[in-house]
Image (tube, rainbow, N blue to C red):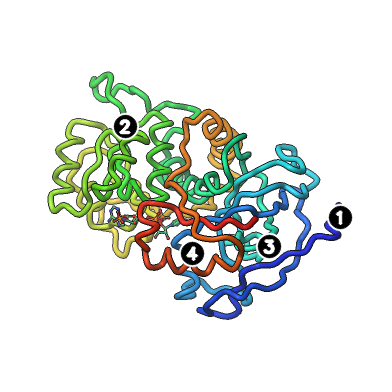
Amino acid sequence: MTLDGLSNRAAWLTSAKSHPFDIAPAPIVPPGPSQVLIRAHAVAINPIDYKLQATAFIPLQYPAILGQDVAGEVVAVGAEVNRFKLGDRVLGVTAGSATRKNEERAFQEYVILEEGLTAPVPEGMAYERAVVVPLGATTGAAGLFLEGALGLSLPTERRGEYKEQDGDSGKKEVVLVLGGASSVGISAVQLAVAAGYEVVATSSPRKSETVLQLGATKVFDYHSHGVVDGLLEFTKGKAVVGVLDAVGAQAQAIEFVQKAGGRKLVATTIPFEEPPEGVSVKFIQALSIKGTEVGKVIWETYLPQALSDGRYVPAPEPVVVGKGLESIQKAVDLKARGGTQSDGKKIVVILE
Ligand SMILES: NC(=O)c1ccc[n+]([C@@H]2O[C@H](COP(=O)([O-])OP(=O)(O)OC[C@H]3O[C@@H](n4cnc5c(N)ncnc54)[C@H](OP(=O)(O)O)[C@@H]3O)[C@@H](O)[C@H]2O)c1
């Protein structure tokens, strides 16, 4: 395979906490046997991007490239890749936060993706719309379905649907998603509904309509003092099979599982400081689905089909804030500020 004639540039973090990114040449690395190389057309911004830049809370080797969510066109495929060919339009979550390899990061023109963490972009779907999916869906899936997290049935199994609970036939098992309008939360809502569970969620009132539209039965305002009481009342008599805390709503998660019947099990995107006795808390690591049955089902079966037939809606809605690598710093800064332009939206930069 030859990559002659291609040149790459990246948004580099030259040292810990450096700002702004330095836009400079970067190597192009040929894909490994199970990888594809793509020309990035759109990237989305996640909280980890500004946290890594601002606080350097995870040690990186500098200069470093950041970025998790990317969509673009396949320009080279590894020897064992059989799901993709040159010219395919794809979306994927980069594996760089696990491998620490700069070529497996999103904020550059040419990006390496694992075949197993990549899906086709459906015909007619713009890259900027598809690119909101990867990290949210991966994290939601890891939290809901991995044995080391909530261990629920996958969308392809649908065992959660209308299961009899203590003679209570016709009721669905319930999953509570705290932060149902966040990127991880809105993905988890859709995945849990697809797997046959009833979903109850929390969000801001202005975002609750979207969470309901994407499948939640009931959404509670997370600012309200009575939120946990409301959740308890609503889920009374139902079989709650777990809580997915997408946003670090520790106090609400713990109070809920302590007072509710059902499994005292919380999967969280942010580690709990001191989980109380009797409550099992599982920290979600998105990339832990790589190479698992969950990863295979989500990335190779469920997402390709459900994105294509509209059962899975790319959410939150994208807001494009700029074009080119030069716009990524502005986009990351906007995400860090929680800018009003991005309220309830996923911040996206178009690269080509
Ligand atoms: N461990 C992992 O593998 C992993 C992977 C992905 C993300 N994460 C982490 O997970 C967290 C969420 O990421 P994300 O991308 O989903 O975030 P996001 O899309 O930026 O969503 C954040 C939104 O959540 C809402 N929110 C904040 N606190 C809330 C609460 N207590 N209850 C309900 N909603 C609340 C806020 O909405 P309002 O503006 O309406 O208040 C906020 O805008 C971040 O801390 C991220 O770093 C971890």
Please name the amino acid that badge 3 sits on.
Glu
For residue 96, side relative to residue 165 (left or right): right
Quarter of the displayed picture in which ligand 1 can be seen: bottom left
Who comes first in sequence, dot 4 or dot 1?
1
Looking at the rendered structure, the secondary structure element under dot 2 is strand
> Could you give the CA–CA distance between mark 3 and mark 2, rounded to whole angstroms?
40 Å
Q: Which residue is more in the foreground, 282 or 114?
A: 114
Q: Are marks 2 and 1 in contact (CB under 8 Å)?
A: no
Callout in the foreground (3, 2)? 3
Who comes first in sequence, dot 3 or dot 1?
1
Neighbor class of circle 1 (other Cα within 10 Å; few <14, some 14-19, many 20+) is few
Q: Which residue is mark 1?
A: 2
Residue 147 lies, in percent from the top left, at 46, 43
Who comes first in sequence, dot 2 or dot 4?
2
Q: Which residue is more in the foreground, 231 or 222?
A: 222
For residue 235, side relative to residue 73 (left or right): left
> Could you give the CA–CA distance between mark 4 and mark 3, rounded to whole angstroms?
21 Å
Callout in the foreground (4, 1)? 4
Q: Which residue is mark 3?
A: 103
Who comes first in sequence, dot 2 or dot 1?
1
Who comes first in sequence, dot 3 or dot 2?
3
Q: Which residue is mark 4?
A: 331
Hey, which quadrant is residue 302 in on the image? top right
Residue 63 lies, in percent from the top left, at 63, 76
> Could you give the CA–CA distance between mark 2 and mark 1, rounded to whole angstroms?
50 Å
Neighbor class of circle 4 (other Cα within 10 Å; few <14, some 14-19, many 20+) is many
Q: Residue at x 23, y 21 (%)?
A: 168
- Is residue 94 placed above or below 310 in the rendered structure? below
Q: Which residue is mark 2?
A: 198
Callout in the foreground (2, 1)? 1
Please name the amino acid that badge 2 sits on.
Glu
